[in-house]
Image: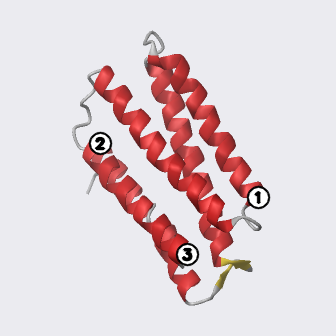
């Protein structure tokens, strides 16, 4: 059975939630992962995904290089990658601030990407924006739960 690129994108995106959920469960159960505190693993995975999304933002900017938003999008992309890197460096001592910075990053990238798609009148694939809305909401909720843990 062959999957369409849309189906592959969607399945991979939702599978990407699993490490968040697993590490959150380990935080609640006071378990370690890979010899590390579960909180540290949650933050590390979150920072990697934020960097990944920053790369997607970079790609969007390149695809719309003639747009007036392109320059700012390129700068935002780098900013979010640097924020993720900074979080990785400081997370053990600053768990709450790290989670808040990552949460802000996910919401800001979602907003920026949504605005670019609106300005450029991009609606394809049609399933992308609703999926991003759900995923960003779930990731934000998981970060808030991690903050409360």
- Which is closer to the viewer, label 1 or label 2? 1
Quadrant location of residue 52?
Answer: top right
Q: Answer few, some or many: residues within 10 Å of disc 3's Cα (few below 14, many 20 plus, some between 14 and 19).
A: many
Whether residues under marks 3 and 2 lie with C-beta atoms below 8 angstroms apart, the answer is no
Residue 10 to residue 23: above or below = above
Q: Position of residue 90 (x, y in %)?
A: 76, 58
Task: Evaluate whether residue 147 shows in this view.
Answer: yes
Residue placed at 60% from the left, 26% from the top?
75
Q: Which residue is mark 1?
A: 90
Residue 32 to residue 84: above or below = below
Task: Evaluate whether residue 4 shows in this view.
Answer: no
- Work out which quarter of the rendered image holds the C terminus and state it: bottom right
Residue placed at 45% from the left, 9% from the top?
66
Quadrant location of residue 35?
Answer: bottom right
Give the Cα separation between the discs numbered 3 and 2: 26 Å
Give the Cα separation between the discs numbered 1 and 3: 19 Å
Residue placed at 77% from the left, 67% from the top?
93
Q: Position of residue 123 (x, y in %)?
A: 24, 30
Task: Report the colour scheme.
Answer: secondary structure
Residue placed at 67% from the left, 67% from the top?
95
- The disc at residue 128 is 2
- Work out which quarter of the rendered image holds the N terminus and state it: bottom left
Left or right of 7 in this view: 41 = right
Q: Which residue is mark 3?
A: 23
Q: Position of residue 126 (x, y in %)?
A: 22, 38
Whether residues under marks 1 and 2 lie with C-beta atoms below 8 angstroms apart, the answer is no
């Amino acid at each position: 059975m062959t999957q369409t690129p849309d189906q592959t994108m969607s399945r991979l995106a939702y599978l990407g939630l699993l490490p968040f959920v697993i590490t959150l469960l380990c935080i609640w159960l006071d378990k370690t992962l890979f010899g590390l505190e579960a909180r540290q693993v949650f933050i590390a995975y979150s920072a990697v995904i934020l960097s990944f999304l920053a790369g997607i933002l970079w790609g969007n900017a390149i695809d719309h290089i003639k747009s007036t938003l392109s320059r700012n999008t390129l700068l935002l992309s780098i900013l979010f990658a640097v924020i993720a890197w900074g979080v990785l460096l400081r997370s053990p001592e600053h768990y709450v601030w790290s989670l808040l910075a990552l949460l802000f990053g996910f919401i800001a990238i979602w907003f920026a990407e949504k605005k670019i798609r609106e300005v450029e009148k991009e609606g394809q694939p049609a399933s992308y924006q609703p999926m991003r809305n759900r995923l960003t909401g779930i990731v934000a909720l998981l970060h808030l739960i991690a903050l409360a843990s």
